[in-house]
Image (tube, grey):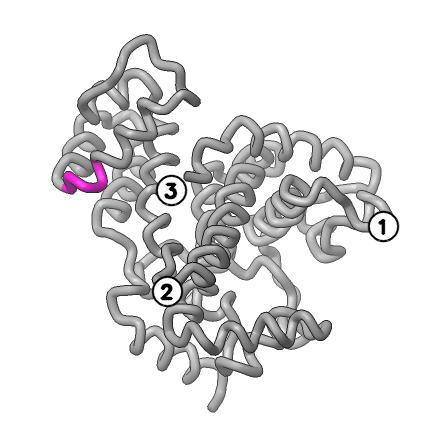
């Protein structure tokens, strides 16, 4: 079975499990076209009571230290701002996809979730500096490991085989392809395309290179790749033994015009953003 057929089969088998909540689409649409439209954003969110409750719980968390408890989406928008509501709404909407039925699934997917949030946060913090839209950087970072959850949900036992192959030194994309016929990047990009996301955002999910890739300008994907490296550093506290100048994938450097001397500053800035945004780990 070729890669495209494998992706189609996995998405068909997952059905609604590979779908974003409708409220997420509305939030992205509204804030993408008219970032000042607070009334429209409020209307889009309040129609989903469960979603609204989660968003309000986060708004009332210690992280924001609001002067008073907020009891409505309107108040949340007023106190924490449109951009933060959009970012938090995206995280709330995507989080349910990373829930597992068993303890082992939950641990695995929670680790993936934390990596995704941290990658998104770091990518957004660096976006403006490299001419990338902040919202796109955050969304692509949040979704770049989404394909792993879809693969895992399609056959949870099979992903254990992927992990076993990785433990034996097989690159993750080769391990996934050996077990599923495709890798998580393929699934994430196909899902995003089916949701009608912009082509730039779909391509931004191509955050790592395979031997069969053709060189192309992909600044968003390069930024997501950097976010992923910084997320790993945030979790482990370690940079590769050959130093921070080699921590970033080689292909991202020409895309963003990064020199070896800049990598320490880039990693430090991303780590600072992750620390400030840790409330979204849930």
Residue neighbourhood size for the residue with mark 2, other residues' Cα within 10 Å, grouped as few (<14), some (14–19), many (≥20):
many
- Which residue is at 18% across, 38% downward? 44
Q: Nearer the viewer, residue 133 or 207?
A: 207
Residue hosting label 2 = 191
**Which residue is disc 3 drawn over?**
91
Question: Residue 58: where, in percent of width, then height?
Answer: 33, 30
Q: Horizontally, is 71 left or right of 151 in the view?
A: left
Stretch of the chain drawn in magenta? 48-52
Residue 229 forms part of the magenta stretch: no
Residue 108 image position (x, y, % from top left): 50, 58
Q: How many marks?
A: 3
Distance from Cα at disc 3 to Cα at disc 2: 17 Å
Query: If you read the primary sequence from the N terminus, does the residue marked by circle 1 or circle 3 appear first?
Result: 3
In this view, the residue farthest toward the bottom is 1
Q: Are marks 1 and 3 in contact (CB under 8 Å)?
A: no
Q: Using the image as rendered, state which of residue 74 and residue 105 is in the foreground.
A: 105
**Residue 240 at what x, y percent from top left?**
80, 50
Q: In this view of the protein, which residue sits in the foreground, 216 or 273? A: 273
Precedes in sequence: disc 3 or disc 2: 3
Instruction: Name the residue beneath numbered marker 1.
Output: 241
Report whether 111 appears left or right of 105: right
In this view, the mark in front (3 or 2): 3
Question: Compared with residue 271, is residue 116 higher up or lower down, i.e. above or below?
Answer: below
Q: Main secondary structure of the magenta part?
A: helix
Is 102 placed above or below 243 here? Answer: below
Q: Secondary structure at mark 1?
A: loop
């Amino acid at each position: 079975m070729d890669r495209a057929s494998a992706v189609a089969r996995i998405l068909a088998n997952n059905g609604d499990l590979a779908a974003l909540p409708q409220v997420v689409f509305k939030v992205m649409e509204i804030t993408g076209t008219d970032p000042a439209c607070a009334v429209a954003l409020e209307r889009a969110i309040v129609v989903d009571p469960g979603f609204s409750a989660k968003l309000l719980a986060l708004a009332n968390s210690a992280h924001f230290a609001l002067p008073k408890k907020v009891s409505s989406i309107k108040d949340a928008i007023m106190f924490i701002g449109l951009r933060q509501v959009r970012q938090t709404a995206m995280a709330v909407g995507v989080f349910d996809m990373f829930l597992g039925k068993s303890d082992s699934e939950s641990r695995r997917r929670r680790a993936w979730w934390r990596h995704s949030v941290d990658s998104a946060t770091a990518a957004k913090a660096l976006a403006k500096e490299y001419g990338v839209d902040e919202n796109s950087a955050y969304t692509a970072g949040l979704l770049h490991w989404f394909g792993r959850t879809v693969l895992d949900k399609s056959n949870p036992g099979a992903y254990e085989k992927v992990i076993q192959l990785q433990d034996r030194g097989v690159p993750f994309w080769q391990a996934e392809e050996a077990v599923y016929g495709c890798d998580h990047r393929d699934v994430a990009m196909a899902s995003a395309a089916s949701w009608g996301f912009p082509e730039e955002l779909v391509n931004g999910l191509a955050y790592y290179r395979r031997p069969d890739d053709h060189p192309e300008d992909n600044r968003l994907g390069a930024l997501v790749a950097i976010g992923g490296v910084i997320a790993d550093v945030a979790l482990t506290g370690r940079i590769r033994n050959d130093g921070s100048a080699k921590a970033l994938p080689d292909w991202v450097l020409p895309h963003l015009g990064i020199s070896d001397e800049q990598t320490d500053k880039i990693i430090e800035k991303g780590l600072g953003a992750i620390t400030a945004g840790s409330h979204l780990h849930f």
